Image (tube, rainbow, N blue to C red):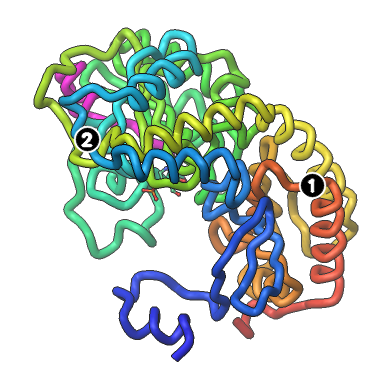
Amino acid sequence: MDFYEIETKYGAGVYAKHQLSIVRGQGASLFDADGNEYLDCTSGHGVANLGHAHPKVAAAIAEQASTLITLFESYPNDKRAALMQKMASLVPGLERVFFCNSGTEAVEAALKFARISTSCTNVVAAMRAFHGRTFGSLSATFNKKYRDGFEPLVPGFIHVPYNKVEALKAAVTEETAAIILEVIQGEGGVYPADAEYIRAARRICDEKGALLIVDEIQSGFGRTGKMFAVQHFEVMPDLLCCAKSLAGGVPMGAVLIGQNVQNLTPGVHGSTFGGNPLSCAAGLAALTAIEEEDLAGQAAEKGAYLMDKLRKIESPIIREVRGMGLMVGIELKKKVAPYLKALQDRNILALNAGMTVLRLLPPLVISYEQIDHLVDVLTDVLAKNSFTDAGE
Ligand SMILES: Cc1ncc(COP(=O)(O)O)c(C=O)c1O
């Protein structure tokens, strides 16, 4: 049996699997067992911002693995303390941090913190939003595809159209604990927020006494051209959720916490693995490398280069190219699945975002040559293939 057959037989069945097994990564490349190379434009859904097998992250993990892997947060630790200090320096004003193990856990923590802090229960989220798949974060997630079959979800959540200030204003009341927003919607189709929308969200929260939660789980750590996407707009949230590329690929999530968030006392929340020294050592190495290699600057420049080239592709199938930095969506006039398969057949791995958006989330260390190659292959795939939506 090959790996595909084994995983299909023994896996839970909740993932649609590609018939392509990957055993190694290096920089922006992935390799199958036969040594065939693939250009990774997925980064594991935005995890591998630093590329695969980054030597400093690998060395930090190896060293910490033989020093101390696990330690509950009740006992302070050198690596955790250092990572806390580092994270406190990322966004002035957000100087406390809660560590967990994934994106959805970061959102769960932020929602709980908003409720305990404000003594209110309601949460206003956006249409098309994706915040995770556990019950709190799923309640903030919009798409029926993720919610159907799991109701009743957590009460008190409503969804309003994204980028519409008046609708947001109308939805927030004195009973609202928080507004939760992605600064650029990822799974929902790669839709960047307008600056005025994010600034209005901050103002509305201040007026009504609600907290502003930004979900930077996909957009964080340099992806959009700043350390966090919200920094494009000079808005300070009260709670900032991050995960994915925080620890260079080792599972880790975090919530950065501002002054307005209160009542965080012992026992209010916690996590067995949260803040474990192994993840913290990886996080410290990853954040140091992200800063030293100016990954945010790289994403800004390479993203502008990529989007410029994509916008010059003359294809009747392309409806729009949009994004921020190296978080890029190409909206097609057709369903995207067969085009993704055609790209994979040409050794380029990319993502969808909904039915018609082709999403590119390459490692931020992707080279200009690799970007040129990506655009050449994509141009060819769009020109040569005319898949009918009915045939999928
Ligand atoms: C914006 C956003 N929030 C939350 C999540 C959930 O993260 P995780 O899969 O680590 O639970 C994701 C994952 O794609 C995401 O993109």
User: Few, some or many C-alpha atoms within 10 Å of disc 1 (few <14, some 14-19, many ≥20)?
Assistant: some
Taking the magenta stretch, the answer to whether it contains residue 186 is no
Secondary element under disc 2, as helix, strand or loop, is loop
Horizontal relation, residue 308 to residue 153: left or right: right
Is residue 30 visible from the viewing direction of this image?
Answer: yes
Question: Horizontally, is 329 left or right of 353 in the view?
Answer: right
The answer to which quarter of the image holds residue 97 is top left
Q: Residue at x 59, y 18 (%)?
A: 233
Residue 211: image x %, image y %?
Answer: 32, 18
Q: On the image, which quarter does residue 374 sit in? A: bottom right
Q: Position of residue 216 (x, y in %)?
A: 48, 33
Q: Is residue 230 above or below residue 369?
A: above
The residue range painted magenta reads 113-128
For label 1, the residue is: 367
| Residue at 39 percent of width and 79 percent of height | 7
User: Which structural element holds mark 1?
Assistant: loop
Q: Residue at x 26, y 50 (%)?
A: 134
| Residue 116 colored in magenta in the image | yes
Classed neighbour count for the residue bearing mark 2: other residues with Cα under 10 Å, few (<14), some (14–19), many (≥20): some
Ligand 1 is within 8 Å of the C-beta of the residue at disc 1 = no
Q: Is residue 339 above or below residue 129?
A: below
Residue placed at 79% from the left, 43% from the top?
307
Where's residue 326, x and y in %? Answer: 68, 41
The amino acid at mark 2 is Leu
Q: CA–CA distance between discs 2 and 1?
A: 39 Å
Q: Which residue is mark 2?
A: 71
Residue 89 vs 371, above or below: the answer is above
- Residue type for callout 1: Ser
Q: Are marks 2 and 1 in contact (CB under 8 Å)?
A: no
Residue 231: x and y in percent read: 57, 19
Q: Looking at the picture, tell me which residue is in the foreground, 168 or 4.
A: 4
